[in-house]
């Protein structure tokens, strides 16, 4: 009881009970109340893109807070939401024509699932089955959990989770098995939508797969009239090297989910974007066809202003150049680990690098993540391994010398 602080009554695991008090963020660094500095090598759960407290984002937040903090977004509208929607529609490939605002990655996926099911229902088509990839992660609400892989994190809610058709992850050499399984799943008369993390499965272990496979998956869905839902909550806003991961496959999803980096990671905001015909299926004076999802903070003006500032940074600063340089730096530093017997599966996509620590004792595997976390924290580095998978997913402003420190610590962790 004594080590159970009231501000965090539900701890994810024991180490959270010893949470570190952070007082300030600056660029790639966290400054702690006890004076320690910690390098944020996971972008604070994959959200921070340009570094903590980018001045343009901070200014936009302050300016908007001075004008309008929050307003009901039903029957009312405001400039930040309208301007952001226009910019997002212009930025994404033609075909994603409408923007629905919510406030977390999980809700953006929940909304996507509801849109997909509503699209069929409102047209009198009996399709309500979701297809998803093995090892996927889509969030912690019931629909998102159902769609994601079953794990210790959602086992308690198993009775409430709906059944989805799960297809194998397209690991190298096994892509055809995935495509065959998808083809079979799409043939089912009730197949409604494939929900997928494009090019890299994040929480499932930073598992990378090819753009060709993604393109084929999109083609198969289209050929069966099954909606293709891209969960770009993690991959969006530059992580995989392009603004959106789907760009690399040259595909346009029917529905796309963005969150995390949409505000540069500064404030919670999410969007679910969809094709015109999905919007039209819900846009009706007939209440039974209306899209009902009205969260209190939908399109919060300050969060929208932060997202607009993020997009402005993408336009006015050399973000793409920064991303390309970070990708090259990651590649270079990862290379020696590819031939290091202590590690396996060194992989990289865009700005993200990952590798697996070889562990002999399977029993150890369950606890190795938290142990590694403690090891890195003791060296002033925030890395949060997924089991024995160590990944580096830093803000784009990280310096070469800071990356060196990270890889030196990973090398040390291998011993
Ligand atoms: N989808 C993906 C691919 C994610 O990585 C995450 C978060 N890790 C989510 C959805 C859920 O986002 P949030 O934590 O903001 O609800």
Image (tube, rainbow, N blue to C red):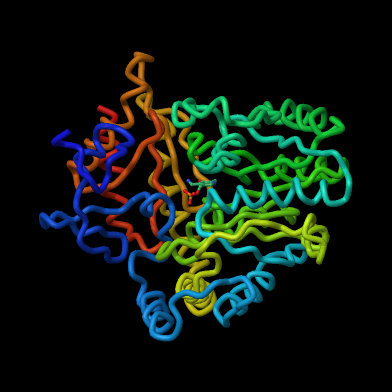
Residue 270 makes an appearance in the image: no
Give the percent coordinates (x, y) of residue 319.
49, 69
* Residue 213 percent location from the top left of the image: 71, 40
Drawn side of residue 235 relative to residue 8, left or right: right
**In the drawing, does residue 247 fall left or right of residue 182?**
left
Spot occupied by residue 98 in the image (x, y as percentages of width and height): 71, 66
Is the residue 381 above or below the residue 160 in the image? below
Residue at image location 38% in from the left, 37% down from the top: 390
Q: Quadrant of residue 125?
A: top right
From where the camera sits, is residue 61 visible?
yes
* Horizontal and vertical percent position of residue 236: 56, 57
- Image position of 353 (left or right of 342): right
Whether 285 is drawn above or below 353: the answer is below
**Relative to 48, residue 145 above or below:** above
Location of the C terminus by quadrant is: top left
Q: Nearer the viewer, residue 67 or 30?
A: 67
**In this rendering, would 27 be left or right of 285?**
left
Please give the name of the residue rendered at 71% of the width and 35% of the height, measured from the top-left corner.
131
Report the residue at 79% width, 55% height from top: 288
């Amino acid at each position: 009881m004594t080590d159970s602080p009231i501000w965090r009554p539900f701890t994810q695991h024991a180490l959270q009970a010893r949470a570190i008090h952070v007082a300030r963020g600056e660029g790639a660094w966290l400054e702690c109340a006890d004076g320690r500095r910690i390098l944020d090598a996971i972008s604070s759960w994959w959200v921070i893109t340009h570094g903590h407290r980018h001045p343009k984002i901070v200014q936009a937040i302050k300016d908007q807070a001075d004008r309008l903090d929050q307003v009901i977004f039903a029957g009312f509208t405001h400039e930040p939401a309208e301007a952001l929607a226009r910019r997002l529609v212009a930025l994404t490939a033609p075909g994603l024509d409408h923007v629905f605002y919510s406030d977390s990655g999980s809700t953006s996926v929940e909304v996507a699932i509801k849109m997909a099911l509503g699209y069929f229902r409102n047209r009198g088509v009996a399709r309500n089955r979701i297809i998803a990839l093995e090892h996927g992660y889509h969030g912690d609400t019931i629909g998102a959990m159902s769609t994601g892989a079953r794990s210790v994190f959602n086992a308690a809610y198993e009775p409430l989770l709906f059944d989805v058709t799960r297809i194998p992850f397209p690991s190298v050499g096994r892509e055809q098995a995935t495509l065959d399984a998808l083809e079979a799943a799409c043939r089912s008369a009730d197949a409604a939508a494939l929900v997928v993390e494009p090019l890299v499965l994040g929480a499932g272990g930073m598992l990378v797969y090819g753009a060709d496979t993604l393109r084929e998956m999109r083609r198969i869905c289209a050929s069966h009239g099954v909606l293709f839902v891209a969960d770009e909550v993690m991959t969006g806003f530059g992580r995989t090297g392009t603004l959106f991961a789907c760009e690399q496959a040259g595909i346009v999803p029917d529905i796309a989910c963005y969150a995390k980096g949409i505000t540069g990671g500064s404030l919670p905001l999410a969007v679910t974007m969809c094709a015109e015909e999905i919007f039209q299926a819900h846009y009706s004076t007939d209440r039974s066809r209306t899209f009902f999802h009205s969260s209190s903070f939908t399109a919060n003006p300050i969060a929208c202003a932060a997202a607009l500032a993020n997009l402005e940074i993408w336009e006015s600063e050399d973000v793409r150049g920064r991303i390309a340089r970070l990708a090259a730096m990651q590649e270079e530093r990862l290379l020696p680990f590819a031939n290091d017997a202590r590690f396996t599966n060194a992989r990289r996509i865009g700005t993200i690098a990952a590798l697996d620590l070889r562990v002999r004792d399977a029993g150890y595997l369950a606890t190795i993540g938290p142990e590694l976390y403690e090891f890195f924290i003791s060296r002033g580095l925030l890395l949060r391994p997924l089991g024995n998978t160590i990944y580096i997913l830093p803000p784009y402003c990280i310096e070469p010398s800071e990356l060196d420190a990270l890889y030196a610590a990973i090398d040390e962790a291998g011993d």
